[in-house]
């Protein structure tokens, strides 16, 4: 059977509040999500899946998740979601009843088989704390999933980056036991990408030998303060999401991550005249 490319959009850190409330009294996160969903809906080719990598709600409350699911009702692609530090596992289970997480209680881990790919979503939230950690149960589960289906490329997603991005107040809240994750990833060469959120801005590094990305947010961005100049702050920057495109090929194929700005932009305009010459 011919293998086809797979197109996975990753959106992150939605921070949906109750209707009419602004995040930090400034950011209309519901409007930002609606604009993001419009962008996802008009994307071509049609997306195969949307991954929401945590911080779906803000405080969190049932009313926020109700607002979130109302907004997500407009999305024309199936989605999967893992919690961030602003989420509640219990409220997420109630809000997303059709989502089969790995266990009936505890972390909201999930394994999704999408054509040739394995998507493994890890719950790095620590109830009551802003930092991330993968508990022993999640690490064992990850190792077990990766030990089956050898030969299938696997993409991992979790909210908390397992590396420091250089922004002091966010680095205190990253994944505490990154070494445990690295040890597992290193044992399984089929892992092709680790996609994270939490920092509200795009970043890329290599972790345990493979690409590890942070997805930008559809709303506000954490201030890129690499010199400890300011108290924890945010900025309104161009909103964006990530598209992870997998292309079949030798070995595990190729994953290419594109950053896609959300909004109406001019174009596309042609490079060439009708006679094939470059427009000058
Ligand atoms: Fe977060």
Image (spheres, rainbow, N blue to C red):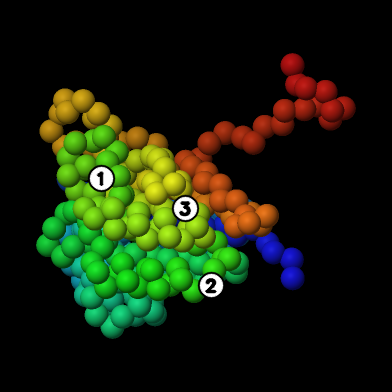
Mark nearest the camera among 3 and 1 is 3
Q: Which residue is mark 3?
A: 193
Tell me if residue 36 comes above or below residue 206 in the rendering: below
Residue 249 showing in the rendered view: yes
What residue sits 80% from the left and 26% below the top?
273
Picture coordinates of residue 35 (x, y %)? 42, 50
Label 3 SS = strand
CB-based contact (under 8 Å), mark 3 and mark 2: no
Sort mark 1 into few (<14), some (14-19) or many (20+) by Cα contacts within 10 Å: some
Residue at the image position 35 percent from the left and 76 percent from the top: 101
178 left or right of 268 in image = left
Residue that badge 2 annotates = 149
Where residue 166 sits: x, y (%)? Answer: 26, 34
Q: Is residue 174 above or below residue 111?
A: above
Residue that label 1 marks: 27
Q: Quadrant of the C terminus?
A: top right
Mark 1 lies on a secondary structure that is loop
Give x and y (percent) for residue 63.
21, 68
**Could you tell which of marks 3 and 2 lies nearer the N-terminus?**
2
* Image quadrant where residue 21 sits: bottom left
Quick one: label 3 or label 1, which is nearer the N terminus?
1
Q: Measure how far apart labels 1 and 2 are at the Cα level.
A: 43 Å
Residue ID at (56%, 51%): 255
Measure how far apart labels 3 and 2 are at the Cα level: 17 Å
Question: Which label lies toward us, 1 or 2?
Answer: 2
Q: Position of residue 43 (x, y in %)?
A: 57, 53
């Amino acid at each position: 059977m011919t293998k086809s490319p797979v197109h996975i959009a990753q959106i992150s850190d939605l921070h949906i509040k109750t209707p009419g409330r602004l995040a930090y009294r400034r950011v209309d996160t519901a409007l930002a999500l609606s604009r993001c969903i419009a962008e996802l809906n008009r994307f071509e080719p049609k997306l195969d899946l949307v991954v929401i990598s945590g911080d779906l709600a803000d405080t969190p409350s049932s009313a926020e998740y109700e607002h979130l699911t109302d907004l997500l009702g407009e999305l024309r692609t199936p989605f999967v979601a893992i919690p961030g530090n602003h989420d509640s596992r219990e409220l997420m289970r109630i809000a997303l009843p059709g989502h089969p997480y790995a266990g009936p209680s505890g972390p909201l881990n999930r394994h999704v088989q999408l054509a040739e790919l394995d998507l493994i979503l890890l719950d790095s939230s620590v109830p009551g704390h802003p930092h991330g950690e993968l508990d022993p149960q999640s690490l064992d589960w990850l190792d077990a999933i990766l030990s089956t289906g050898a030969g299938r490329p696997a993409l991992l997603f979790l909210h908390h980056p397992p590396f420091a991005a250089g922004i002091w107040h966010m680095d205190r809240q990253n994944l505490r036991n990154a070494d445990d994750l690295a040890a597992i990833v290193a044992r399984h060469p089929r892992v092709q990408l680790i996609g994270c959120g939490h920092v509200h801005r795009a970043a890329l590094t290599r972790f345990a030998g493979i690409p590890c990305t942070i997805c930008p947010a559809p709303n506000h961005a954490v201030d890129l303060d690499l010199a400890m100049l300011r108290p924890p702050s945010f900025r309104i920057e161009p909103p964006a999401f990530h598209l992870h495109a997998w292309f079949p090929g030798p070995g595990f194929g190729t994953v290419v991550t594109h950053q896609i700005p959300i909004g109406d932009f001019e174009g596309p305009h042609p490079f060439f005249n009708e006679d094939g010459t470059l427009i000058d």
